[in-house]
Amino acid sequence: MDRKVELLVPAGSLEVLKIAIMFGADAVYIGGEEFSLRAKAANFSDEDMIAGIDFAHKFGKKVYVTVNIFAHNYDMDEAVDYLKRLNEIKPDGLIMSDPGLISLAFEYAPNVEVHISTQANNTNYMTYKFWYKMGVKRVVSARELSLEEIKGIRENIPDDMEIESFIHGAMCISYSGRCLLSNYFTGRDANRGECTHPCRWQYAVVEEKRPGEYLPVYENERGTFIFNSKDLCMIGHIPEMIDAGIDSFKIEGRMKTSLYVATVARTYRKAIDDYYKSIDTYKSNMDWYMDEISKCTYRKFTTGFYFGKPNEETQIYDSNTYISEYIYLGFVEEIRSGKYKITQRNKFLIGDEIEIMKPGGENVIAKVINIEDEEGNVVPAASHAKQTLYITLSEKADEYDIFRVQNKDVKKP
């Protein structure tokens, strides 16, 4: 069966959804305001969801909605109402993990496909076959699987069943994202969208019979971050991912910025397209992929479990911070009389050199000639976050192009 792999990109807002589509996503996954595992993301109202699906479908792309919490009895009435609304809105799929909610989806949202979330711990081909018999055509593999194991799943499931696997993004220290630390420490349940990311905190050791005696495990003067994983990055292993029989390459990050989503989507889009042109084209552009992928925020890189169990090299023990090589300024929302409308995200000045990031892969250096506010007043410095501005540049930009500037303070690893 011929399979053209899907590039599946996250979006935490309508703005990010549009950027993801324009920068190369085949499909986007989003969360509604209810029953999604990213409570801190902006998430989508029903109106934004409809607008986002219309936008994606206009370009022949798909939108999947996450309904992947583990529900309690008191959630059921609201879940039925929400699923009925989703049945009318008609996204291209629902990403789910709770068997109770899945059964409700079959009943109350029959017009929408169900995809089984990685939260459901999908580690073997019998699990896939079980869901197939239930009427499910796509299952997201657990992050803990190797490519060899995924290949074994593909060999033992129906040809028309799809495998979705993560290819890039943050890794959880707990099993397939089912984190208990957040709930234990703060009462905020990671499996209901309120994770406080305790895997990024600093820890010390306490001996049972010496309470209050904290023993730091020093890696350097900043301590050690024993649960802090490097980020997954498989851009150098797309042939192996395709060979394993994966149908959809999933990027993590529904709480990430437009710049992050555009950078990752564009880079993987080019890598996938280059691979389908020829393996030599793909290999010859590897330096470009790695250079571009490092221009978004990241915590160094690992291949996760794909080539065997991770070891100490996959952890970051001396820091819990992201590396941010570029700063996001905004994207072109509209072009009016040669001026580019943006909603400003970070400070820049008249006379600065910025970079125009284009969906096709070009990065164009441009000088900021002028900045005006909505009343037409000249603004020497764009210093107010979320201010609407009209920018004049020395170079041409197009709608949805992203403006960014290099972060001169960053220290690369």
Image (tube, rainbow, N blue to C red):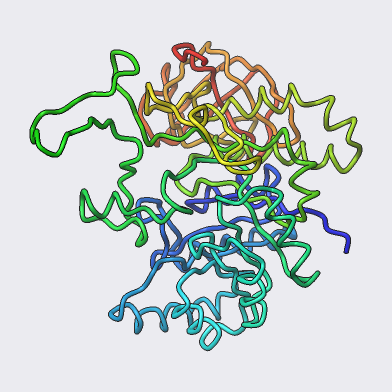
Give the quarter of the image for residue 80: bottom left
Q: Is residue 41 left or right of residue 171?
A: left
Quadrant where the N terminus lies? bottom right
Residue 83: % across, % down:
47, 79
Q: Nearer the viewer, residue 3 or 123?
A: 123
Residue 329 visible to an observer of this rendering:
no
Residue 190 rendering spot, x and y as whole percentages: 34, 55
Relative to 382, is 245 on the left or the right?
A: right
Q: Residue at x 66, y 40 (%)?
A: 307
Q: Nearer the viewer, residue 235 or 219?
A: 219
Q: Is residue 383 visible?
A: yes
Quadrant in the rendering for residue 188: bottom left
Whole-percent x and y of residue 50? 55, 67
Identify the residue at image location x=22%, y=32%. Answer: 205
Write the residue at 53% across / 51% down. 11
Task: Between residue 374 and residue 128, name the one nearer to us.
Answer: 128
Q: Is residue 75 left or right of residue 345?
A: left
Q: Residue placed at 51% from the left, 86% from the top?
A: 108
